[in-house]
Amino acid sequence: MVRSAPFARVSNHAPFHNAPARGAGIEGLAAWPLGEEKRRKTGIKTVMPQPPVIDIWIHGACAAGGYGGWSYVVREGDQWRGAAGAATRTDAEAMVLTALSTVLEVVADAPASARLSLHLADPAILDASDTQAILRARLAKGLARWPAGPTVIDARKAANPKAWSDFLGSWADFARDKAKTRGAFSAPIPKLNIAKFAQDAI
């Protein structure tokens, strides 16, 4: 006698493919689409990611004869970097604008949601002006990436203003002096020096 195969039990309900495994605990419940009221009862909190923070410090200097130097340091999260450069036939305003527009191009790949903080010795440098039209157009292009606009901080009122002004001033002056023999150039500031700035200026 041949026995027929038993019928398989058929469920009228579709399985929860995304349901947490038994014993997964409250962490598993986070995968369920709970309403706000249920979240309050279970104690589950929705943590929204914070936008990254970008801090920028700059400096510009110029000497007689039109030799100028600039420098910047930028912090993106826990990453620090900086650079210095020089130009000829220039002035101090142009060097500050060059430093700022250059560093904005350096961080151009950062998320647009990032919070941008500019630490400036003279916040009025951002005010509209008829001078340095080309540099200001370059600066405006760099700032346009940040819909919320930057937070401008008067660096002279920082907890340790001398630390950043001495550091960036020294590199800008160094680049300015090099311009007398090398002309216009830019180069990164060594990481060991940047690490020292990170310790002293913050």
Image (cartoon, helix red, strand yellow):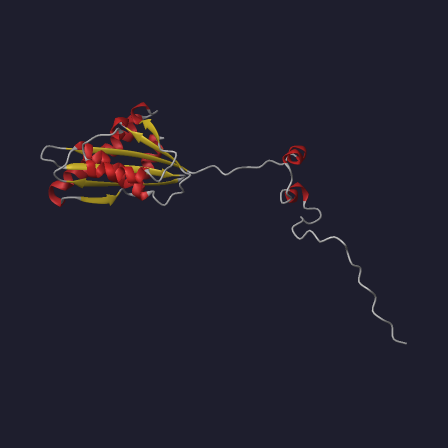
Q: How many marks?
A: 0
Q: Looking at the image, which is closer to me, 56 or 167?
A: 56
* Quarter of the picture holding the C terminus: top left
Residue lying farthest top? 157
Left or right: 2 as drawn, with respect to 155: right
Q: Residue at x 67, y 36 (%)?
A: 38
The location of residue 169, given as percent across then percent down, is 23, 32
Give above or below for 168 relative to 12: above
The location of residue 21, given as percent across then percent down, is 68, 49
Left or right: 30 as drawn, with respect to 59: right
The location of residue 139, given as percent across then percent down, is 27, 38
Give above or below for 190 relative to 197: below
**To which quarter of the image does residue 198 belong?**
top left
Residue lying farthest left? 65
Q: Residue at x 28, y 43 (%)?
A: 190
* Quarter of the picture holding the N terminus: bottom right
**To which quarter of the image does residue 47 belong?**
top right
Q: Residue at x 14, y 41 (%)?
A: 179
**To which quarter of the image does residue 164 belong?**
top left
Residue lying farthest right? 1
